[in-house]
Amino acid sequence: MEFSKNNKAIYLQIADSIFENILTKKWKPEERLPSVRDFAISIQVNPNTVMRAYTYLQEKEIIFNQRGIGFFVSDKAYERSIEIRKTQFIKNELPNVFKNLDLLGMDISEIEKQYKKKQK
């Protein structure tokens, strides 16, 4: 896993990668996540950082902990991931899209046209 040099904390970048695994259905409801230690080793970070990501995802009801067994993807994970990622997109990314549209004198129809091309 590569971490970007932006201002986003590493634990949130880890959480984003877990969101993506859930949204792409690589990880399914009730599936066990890697242990904190194993995941930390695989992505070369401190286990405390992975634990922080897991805690964050638990608070968001994306994963749950079965004491003594490990962390698992929750039944609501897919829907909650969509909600959270939509909110993040609208808050963090969309303003830059709108700013660039204004700077370049573009309107939303040009974006729509490109999006339709991508769908083909």
Image (cartoon, helix red, strand yellow):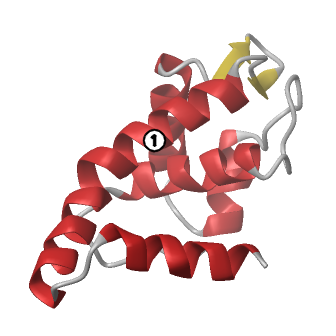
Relative to 96, residue 14 above or below:
above
Query: Of 22 and 47, which appears nearest the observer?
Result: 22
Q: Is residue 13 left or right of residue 19?
A: left
Question: Residue 31, image x and y in percent?
Answer: 89, 31
The residue wearing badge 1 is: 86
Q: Residue furthest left?
A: 103
The three-letter code of the residue at mark 1 reads Lys
Query: Of 98 and 106, which appears nearest the observer?
Result: 106
Relative to 49, residue 84 above or below:
above
Question: Residue 17, image x and y in percent?
Answer: 60, 56
Residue 87, by quadrant, is top left
Local crowd size for mark 1, using a 10 Å CA cut-off: few (<14), some (14–19), many (≥20): few
Query: Which quadrant holds the N terminus?
Result: bottom right
Q: From this viewpoint, is residue 64 visible?
A: yes
Picture residue at 32% right of the left edge, 47% below the top: 90
Question: Residue 5, image x and y in percent?
Answer: 31, 78
Query: Which quadrant holds the C terminus?
Result: bottom right
Picture residue at 36% right of the left edge, 45% below the top: 88
Q: Secondary structure at mark 1?
A: helix
Q: Is residue 23 left or right of residue 108?
A: right
